[in-house]
Amino acid sequence: MLQKREKTGIYGLDELLEGGLIANRAYLIRGGPGCGKTTLGLHFLATGSSQGEPGLFITLSEAAAQIQSHAEALELDLNHITFLDLSPSSEFFTEVQTYDIFSPAEVEREPTTRRIIEQVELLKPKRIFIDAMTQFRYLATDTFQYRKQVLSFIRFLLDGGATVLFTSESSVEAPDDDLQFISDGVIQVVFSSQGRSIAITKFRGSGFQSGDHSLHLSSKGMEVYPRLKPGEHRREFVLEAIPSGIPELDTLMHGGIERGTVTIISGPSGVGKTTVGLQFMKEAAGRGERSVVYTFEEEAEILLSRCESINIPARTMVERGTLSVVKVEPLQYTPDRFARMVREEAEVNNAQIVMIDSVAGYRLSLNGEDLVPHIHALCKYLANMGVTVLLINEVGTVASEFRATDVGITYLADNFVFLRYWERQINGVTEIRKAIGVLKKRLSDFEKNLRELQITRYGIKVGEPMPGLQGILSATPWFTKAEGQ
């Protein structure tokens, strides 16, 4: 029997829940102060409200007026949501209420229970959010009584046909283990120095995506970015060579780079790595294909201006929708959030080439985490979707020993293109020049020689093979004999 699912309305969370929460069940949201528990509940109620479903927000700690103000700032639909404010009022303090004969729990429990019953029977809500369930602990005389009351309360709400979310305020002195056992599912939200994350730790009767996933709170509310699992995504594509449009470069690579492969373009600063990648995108634009550049270091406007100066019509490509240049602030994006952005380009906008410029900039978004598993997942996902990946990797300095990469990702590359500076002499004058070569190509053969690379106002020029160029693996490559003699 197909179970009815209730959408939470939170970007990515329903994906973790494989479609949403199972209806007519109770779920616990755990987490410390400021981690987003109330925002999650508001999204849940607002999603039902937008469908015309009555919702009930029961607050036992924060004033309802504050919560409503927060929801309005997020522009959430409150039309069908009723707020039941059971939080202490200012009069409670000024009147200094005391109980001489009965305990406070016995005195407060009956009116609180009565108000909840009245609202539930009057509204018949389909969605209920309680913040926080642990406040009921103070309306019970002991732990056994508290557990029994909570069980009875949840059963009462579920018997009315509602789907219930409730939060806990746990501590070492007052843990919420009992609520975790009682609930049908547990959603854990965390706010730490590494950022915000969310995890599903329990979900009766359904599968779910395990592990920690990135969470982001903004002026629009809560967004969840599931960790990318490349094996779950795949589409059919033709494994064909993608040319650069420069005959000499395509000859060097025996036709170009293949669709659905990962290419590392490596070399020192300023040698032309990004320009070579953009040349493949320029050619793809001529075929009507879309490409995306994610630049972690260079501003988008500077990149576009630089393209114009070397005969790559990047602005025109952007206007026609065949190119998108996205400036990414690495310290503002987690790997999961960035991966979601890339997924939208691949799945919604059908991008055929994705360039990450550069690996070092992407690494900053990891906040101390290991680079390899994240970039591995992203590259394998794109390759499975038939997207060609270009990774710009800066290594060394102008005059340094040859290194493939500094970060241990060469195993990812189906193709490895490297650029180097070299010296030549003409009539006793030494010049610094550039060379391009291929170190690795999985799906075809390639030239073992290097070719001279020039970047001019007319575009990229690639020369004939240079068999006399020596010392490529040393700090300063050279010719065996001086030119021009």
Image: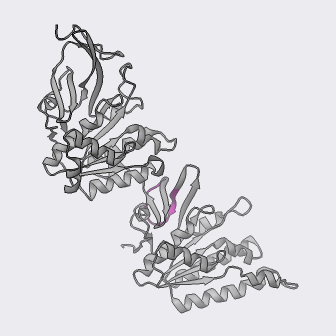
Residue 450: percent from left, percent from top: 21, 21
Where 445 falls versus 378 (above or below)?
above
x 19%, y 11%: residue: 483
Front in this rendered view, residue 82 or 431: 431
x 48%, y 59%: residue: 216
Where 418 falls versus 200 (above or below)?
above
Query: How did the renderer colour the structure?
Result: one colour
Residue 218: percent from left, percent from top: 49, 63
Give the side of residue 459 with respect to residue 79, left or right.
left
Which residue lies most toward the left here? 247
Q: Residue 203: say if magenta.
A: yes
Front in this rendered view, residue 282 or 232: 282
Q: Residue 27: say if magenta.
A: no
Where 56 falls versus 395 (above or below)?
below
Residue 348: percent from left, percent from top: 27, 59
The answer to whether residue 182 is visible is: yes
Where 107 falls versus 212 (above or below)?
below
The answer to whether residue 253 is visible is: no
x 33%, y 48%: residue: 300
Q: Which residues are magenta?
A: 197-210
Residue 207: percent from left, percent from top: 43, 61
x 53%, y 83%: residue: 159
Front in this rendered view, residue 95 or 155: 95
Give the quadrant of the C terminus.
top left
